[in-house]
Amino acid sequence: MLNVVAIREDFPILKREVNGRPLIYFDNAATTHKPIQVIDAIVRFYKEFNSNVHRGMHTLSQEASELYEEAFSVVAKFINAYSWEEVIEVKNATDGLNMVAWGWGLFNLRPGDEIILTVVEHHSNMLPWRIVAEKTGAKIKYVDITDDGDINYDQLEEVVSERTRVVAITMASNVLGTIVDVKRICKIAHSVGAIVVGDGAQYVPHVPTDVRDLGIDFIAFSGHKMLGPTGIGILWGRRDVLEDVKPFRVGGDTIKDVTLDSIEWHDLPWRFIAGTPHIAGMIGFAEAVKYLMRVGVENVRQHDIELTEYTLKKFEEELKEYIVVLGPLDAKKRTGIVSFNVQNLHHHVVAKSLDSFGIAVRSGGHCAHPLHYRLGFKGSVRASYYIYNTVEEVETFISALKIIVTLRDILSRQLVEDRCTGT
């Protein structure tokens, strides 16, 4: 079990007030807050070790390189990678997914090949493949969801064929919270020789992740969604498939040697990390990973279930006639995400009203427009939990929603600037 009271002391921002009320931060699926340990690690790097890596023989460069390279080993241990060399530093999950689509897809797909996506996908795991399909002549096929918000695995088995080369799937939906059966999907895809590319942005921070056990080929995830800094993420891939990925951002540190006639690419992972990397970000991310390993991701998972279960229970008991919940009603089938709509109220109006209570939630299409259209909505309100959230905060959230629904007639006339178009 998590000691949430002790954990909260590590997060300075939680002492803030918003609109005269204690901050209740339920926007963790967008980005999480950073513990003081991560902040201090970044500050310490700049104060004591700041230098470029892999560039100099002097002491600072050697020390910075050692700290930077150690971070890869920390991440590798966290996901049980076969080697730290399979861990590629990227900007975020989006960057990692683009790297696979452009570095693998553009060079390996041919006219008539098939790419399988689902209607659940975040734009980051949909748009790169659609563009690459246009350029290569490959064909996109989509898998639908069931009535309870799960992947339609029966349909997946039907659409996968001998022409399938890629199955790109979210491992946990950023809207529905649905946790996908990755091992089942890998078994289906691998039966026809296809690779499986996983969007792990919402999965890795919340579910114990063992890449060897999952049997997946690629996973991309972001540091800022798991207590780390922004601008840093990881693409993990099995060595044999990584060797088949072409570097598409090249330059400094991606090569061993260059002549006017030839290029000798660097070893993994450096051939994919062009130019000066986000050194402080990678060091800070490693510190975030260490924090989560001390806490235990299995405890993070249990905490998600408890808060989500309590929220869904309160919705059913006290707000059933006003609220439509998106996704599975079984908290064990989802991460700490609860997306919903209040009947006859725009999602932005609900979010802005909650902000007046000091409660931060997300509203909009959540970069998953096709999924919202499939569900019959233009957007939704999303509350998302993490290790520092409490049952008491959920109770305040429910109380605020009860007030909001009683003011629906007034609030429905309120105009809220839509600053989330396209996101």
Image (spheres, rainbow, N blue to C red):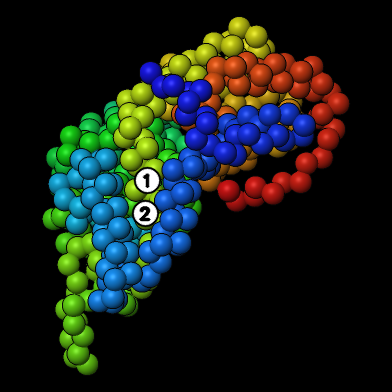
Q: Nearer the viewer, residue 240 or 116?
A: 240
Indicate left or right for 417 with 263 as reference.
Answer: right
- At mark 2, the secondary structure is helix
Left of 328 or right of it: where is 364? right
The answer to whether residue 280 is above or below residue 238 is below
Q: Quadrant of residue 156?
A: top left
Q: To which quarter of the image does residue 306 belong?
A: top left
- Where residue 105 appears, as percent x and y from the top left, is 28, 60
x and y percentages locating residue 227 in the rendered image: 45, 41
Identity, as a three-letter code, of the amino acid under mark 1 = Glu
Secondary structure type for disc 1: helix
**Residue designated by label 1:** 287
- State the count of labels: 2
Pointer 2: what residue?
Answer: 283
User: Tags 1 and 2 in contact by the CB under 8 Å rule?
Assistant: yes
What's under tag 2, amino acid-wise?
Ile
- Residue at the (48%, 52%) spot, across then down: 230
Residue ID at (48%, 48%): 39
Q: Indicate the quadrant where residue 106 lies.
A: bottom left
Q: Is residue 279 above or below residue 411?
A: below
